Amino acid sequence: MSTGLFLINGGYKVHVYERAEKILPVGAAISVWSNGVKVMNKLGLGKEIAQLGGRMNRMIYNGADNTPFVDMDLSTVYMDVGERAYPVARADLQQLLMDKYVEAGGKLTLGKTCVDVQRVDENDQDSKTYAIFDDGSKSDICDLLIGADGIRSCVRNFVLQKNTPIVYHYTNWNGIVPMFGDKKTWDEWVMYVGEGKRASLMPIAGGRFYFFMGAPLPEGAPAPARQSESMREELKELFKGWPEQVQTLIDMIDVSRLNRIPICDHDPLHSLFRGRVVLIGDAAHATTPTLGQGGCQALEDAEVLSTFILTTNMGIKNCLQRYQDHRLARVHNMVLKARSRTKTIYPTNSEQWRETEKWYNELKTSPQVGKLILKGITQNL
């Protein structure tokens, strides 16, 4: 939607086809780090994202036994990069972008799942294209088709001319709960780590916490019935003996709104476009959420692609090549860096466990670990 808004504002006609049949307040939240906030600023939505986002001033690691590890002031990151981060409810961000897109004159059609991409002239590599949907209908014939159809992208299959294997890493539970505990801590992002698992609370607007919990369950492990108390019992068992704040969180969860998601990614791609079809977001670079950069990289895609479209006059191929040249190394690095981080947080073999134990020890004992973590965050932004 952000790409569509950039292009609408630049004078292009845009038609977004959305898989969902209704726009519902689903999903939990998203970490819009400073690089993503800067894109929102360029869209003229800086004030709105600040209103929707939580005030996250500190980042804290504790052990699974409640041992304090490291407490970091995020203002140093914000000052270095020139902008804050704003964790925001995903539904709020989606609604904001959709409303602004439609208000600007963008066309939106719901209930359309792309199953194929075709050229008008299959013998012409530069031919205009169209999407085919699961109900047999077709999109408008377009000068440029932008695939933002997620990790299991059909558009990506067209670009690469093959399927891309999806790699499973761990299981994530997430949702939103009312803030609880000491009000003095409501501007803190608190993480508990241990036993190859993680539990986290992050402030968002409206007096709420976004929570996410992860564990390296085997791929395809039996799952409790959705929206059942068995989901809570699963978390109680996985995080048995963890600190009181974690137990309170589990007790507060509304299981009817609890998400249980297999976290996957795919290997970096060698190309982001083919002809007049280009990939953005998870279709281009699905990554695990361990860096908090998935949504931010999609926003960067929107800014970079729209900038080249609006400023390049040497043809669509030249424009898309520039986009790819600008983005490929950046998104490759994010995918692989997040994957490496995932293996440390959620180890699944003895070699990874050695790195995890080393990380726990550094968090507990190294006087430099906080500075190194903040430096790593800054480099991502």
Image: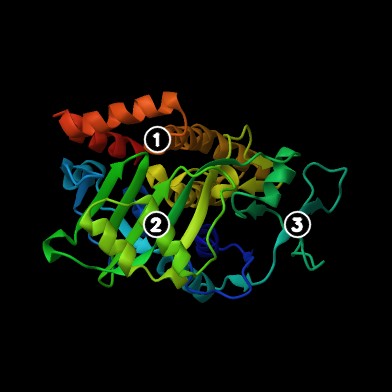
Give the structural element (helix, strand or loop) at label 3. strand
* Circle nearer the viewer, 3 or 1: 1
Give the camera-side residue of 127 and 344.
Answer: 344
Q: Amino acid at mark 2?
A: Leu
Name the side, left or right, on which 295 lies relative to 380.
right
Circle 1 Cα neighbour tier, 10 Å, few/some/many (<14 / 14–19 / ≥20):
some
Where is residue 143, by image quadrant?
bottom right
Name the side, left or right, on which 76 lies relative to 223.
left
**Residue 28: x and y, percent?**
42, 63
Give the structural element (helix, strand or loop) at label 1. helix
| Real-space CA distance between mark 3 and mark 1, rounded to the nearest whole angstrom | 33 Å
| Real-space CA distance between mark 3 and mark 2, rounded to the nearest whole angstrom | 36 Å
Give the camera-side residue of 298 and 197.
Answer: 197
* Circle nearer the viewer, 3 or 2: 2
Q: Earlier in the sequence, mark 2 or mark 1?
A: 2
Q: Residue at x 32, y 35 (%)?
A: 379
Residue under label 2, please give it: 235
- As drawn, 134 above or below 373: below
Q: Residue at x 22, y 41 (%)?
A: 80
**Residue 77: x and y, percent?**
22, 43
**Residue 98: x and y, percent?**
50, 70
Q: Is residue 302 visible?
A: yes
Mark 3 in CB contact with mark 1 (< 8 angstroms): no
Q: Amino acid at mark 3?
A: Val
Circle 2 Cα neighbour tier, 10 Å, few/some/many (<14 / 14–19 / ≥20):
some
**Residue 363: x and y, percent?**
22, 34
Residue under label 3, please give it: 115
Residue under label 1, please give it: 341
Name the side, left or right, on which 76 lies relative to 84.
left
Give the structural element (helix, strand or loop) at label 2. helix
Q: Residue at x 34, y 59 (%)?
A: 211
Q: Earlier in the sequence, mark 3 or mark 2?
A: 3
